[in-house]
Amino acid sequence: MPITDYRTRWSGIRKSDLYGAMPYDQARKEILKLLVGKVLIGHAIHNDLRVLNYNHPKALIRDTSRIPLLNAKAGFPEHQPASLKRLTKAIFNQDIQTGRKGHSSVEDAKATMELYKVIEVEWERKMASTALVKTFHRLFKSLLQFWSDHWWTLPYIDLKGGANYTETNTSVVYSFCLLARSNELH
């Protein structure tokens, strides 16, 4: 399918840039080989992944347009995507994307990496903690299902009356999971 709009203002690409270029299908295959299993850092990277028709694991994506910590440091609403230009200006007091010839992919990539470095340690710690909580939750959910499937009973202690008895009650374990999670996060 021929290109009808190069979106030069944003891409910086002109028709003349593509003479002798590698065909899309071949370029896509090469790119996907590089991406598999890697952490992707980009700004509004979902757009690039859509063009590639590729779904990368969410846990391996660091999208600087959607990192609440970065928005908070810039003074922007935490859960609204912010443009690369605005974030770079707010955090580094640096102007990018000012030329009339369109965006420079090199300039954008450098700005994105510098922004990511600002919150990298804190963000990765949060990602690891979130992943641990999700794993813990999935494990106990599976365990609860196993107990439920096999009609296992859980020991239950009535704290008011002090009486011990056995009851089929998976909510006790689930409550334990929620309590453990809340203690971990504080």
Image: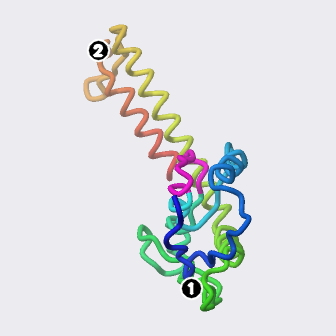
Classify 10 Å Cα crowding around label 1: few (below 14), some (14-19), many (20 and above): some
**Label 2 element class:** strand
**In this orientation, which residue lies closer to the viewer: 137 or 11?**
11
| Vertical arrangement, residue 173 with respect to residue 95, above or below | above
**In this orientation, which residue lies closer to the viewer: 66 or 31?**
31
* Left or right: 63 in relation to 158: right
Q: Identify the magenta region.
A: 49-61
Residue 47: image location, x then y, percent = 51, 62
- Tell me the residue that label 1 is attached to: 90
Residue in view at x 49 percent, y 81 percent: 75
Determine which quarter of the picture holds residue 125. bottom right
- Tell me the residue that label 2 is attached to: 167
Residue in view at x 52 percent, y 50 percent: 53
| Vertical arrangement, residue 123 with respect to residue 145, above or below | below
Residue type indicated by callout 2: Glu
Residue 185: image location, x then y, percent = 50, 50
